[in-house]
């Protein structure tokens, strides 16, 4: 049942009080629900099919599965990110600011983003959710060749 539907971030004063037992949030996902999930960090890879590049990436505190990956200018890039952590509330984020990418992945969840790598250079990808004592070390980079 839909509780609320908003087109923007929720207004803090827009709330409804309900009994806690009616809310059943999922704390840790089932990795098998995601057909594109990367189930082991050693399976991280980059696949190219013409101008389409798929980056299979994992996050597990405090690292991403790839330290870097390379694409070419004009490539359509899809990053598929799986959070391998199994601890409740150990959410990771992935941000590549120059490409306006920023999303979170909950424990055992997989999400993806697709964009055109149209600007040559080195772009840092980093975790945006405080996840570990070494959180500030949780980063990777995308190299876009001209």
Image (cartoon, grey):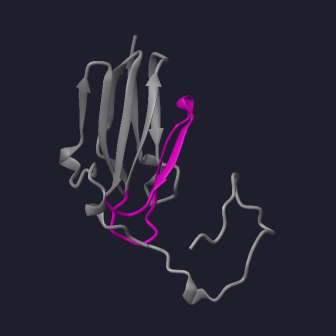
Q: Is residue 111 above or below residue 78?
A: below
**Position of 132 compared to 54: left or right?**
right
Q: Is residue 56 above or below residue 38?
A: above
Front residue of 5/32: it is 5
**Position of 130 compared to 47: left or right?**
right
Image quadrant occupied by the C terminus: top left
Q: Quadrant of residue 32?
A: bottom left
Q: From which residue to which does the magenta span run?
A: 84-109
**Position of 96 compared to 13: left or right?**
left
Question: Which residue is at 37% across, 38% downward?
Answer: 79
Question: Which residue is at 40% across, 32% downward?
Answer: 141
* Horizontal and vertical percent position of residue 80: 35, 43
Front residue of 68/79: it is 79
Q: Residue furthest left?
A: 42
Image quadrant occupied by the N terminus: bottom right
Q: Residue furthest right?
A: 13
**Position of 92 compared to 13: left or right?**
left
The answer to if 55 sits in the magenta stretch is: no
The answer to if 103 sits in the magenta stretch is: yes
Question: Which residue is at 81% across, 69% downward?
Answer: 13
* Horizontal and vertical percent position of residue 122: 44, 23
Q: Residue furthest front?
A: 1
Q: Is residue 43 above or below residue 134?
A: above
* Horizontal and vertical percent position of residue 6: 69, 58
* Horizontal and vertical percent position of residue 98: 56, 29
Question: Which residue is at 37% across, 59% downward?
Answer: 109
Q: How many marks?
A: 0
Q: Is residue 52 above or below residue 81?
A: above
């Amino acid at each position: 049942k839909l509780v609320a539907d908003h087109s923007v971030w929720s207004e803090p004063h827009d709330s409804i009080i309900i009994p806690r037992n009616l809310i059943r949030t999922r704390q840790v996902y089932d990795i098998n629900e995601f057909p594109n999930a990367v189930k082991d960090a050693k399976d991280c890879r980059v696949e190219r099919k013409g101008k389409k590049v798929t980056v299979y990436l994992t996050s597990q505190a405090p690292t991403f599965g790839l330290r870097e990956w390379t694409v070419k200018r004009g490539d359509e890039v899809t990053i598929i990110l799986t959070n391998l952590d199994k601890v409740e509330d150990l959410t990771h984020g992935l941000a590549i600011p120059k490409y306006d990418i920023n999303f979170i992945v909950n424990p055992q969840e997989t999400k993806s983003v697709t964009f055109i790598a149209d600007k040559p250079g080195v772009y840092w990808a980093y975790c945006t959710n405080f996840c570990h004592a070494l959180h500030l070390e949780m980063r990777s980079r995308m190299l876009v060749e001209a």
